[in-house]
């Protein structure tokens, strides 16, 4: 099912040396999936439960990381044509730290 909402999160504990990404996808049904940088999919019954899990696992939204000045605004989430390609680029050495 297509996602109604997608947001990108970074493991703030790994910054500034490494960027470990997670993608939060929330479906129209309200169910949520987190794809982490290890390629694991975590399934939740709600977006709120997924966001709480991410926060407990030391992730913050990309916007929060930029607003806090931990990274510059020119950082962008990884991309890939498939999830398999995406996972390869979800863990990288940070090159845009302040």
Image (cartoon, rainbow, N blue to C red):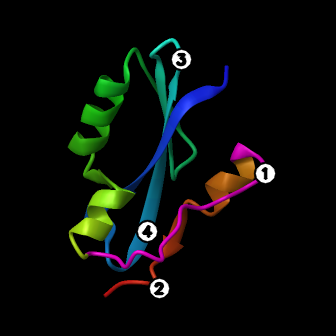
Looking at the image, tell me whether mark 3 or mark 1 is earlier in sequence order. 3
User: Circle 1 sits on which residue?
Assistant: 81
> In the displayed image of the protein, which residue is found farthest to the right?
81
Identify the residue under disc 4.
19
Compute the Cα span from label 4 to label 1: 20 Å
Residue closer to the observer: 30 or 18: 30
Please tell me whether mark 4 or mark 1 is closer to you in this view: 1
Task: Say which element carries label 1.
Answer: loop
Where is 24 relative to 18, above or below? Answer: above
Locate residue 37 relative to residue 16 in the image: left or right: right
Judge the density around disc 4: few (<14), some (14-19), many (≥20) Cα neighbours within 10 Å.
many
Compare marks 4 and 3 and give the one earlier in the sequence: 4
**Mark 3 or mark 2, whichever is nearer to me:** 3
| Whether label 2 touches label 4, CB < 8 Å | no
In the rendered picture of this protein, how many numbered marks are placed on residues?
A: 4
Question: To which residue does mark 2 refer?
Answer: 95
Marks 3 and 4: in contact by CB < 8 Å? no
Q: Residue at x 47, y 17 (%)?
A: 31
Q: Position of residue 62 (x, y in %)?
A: 38, 59
């Amino acid at each position: 099912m297509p996602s109604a909402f997608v947001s990108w999160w970074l493991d703030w504990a790994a910054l500034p040396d490494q960027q470990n990404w997670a993608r939060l996808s929330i479906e129209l049904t309200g169910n949520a999936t987190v794809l982490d940088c290890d390629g694991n999919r975590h399934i939740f019954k709600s977006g709120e439960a997924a966001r709480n899990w991410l926060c407990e696992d030391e992730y913050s939204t990309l916007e929060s990381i930029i607003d806090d000045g931990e990274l510059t605004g020119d950082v962008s989430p990884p991309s890939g044509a498939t999830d398999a390609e995406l996972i390869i680029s979800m863990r990288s050495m940070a090159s845009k730290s302040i």
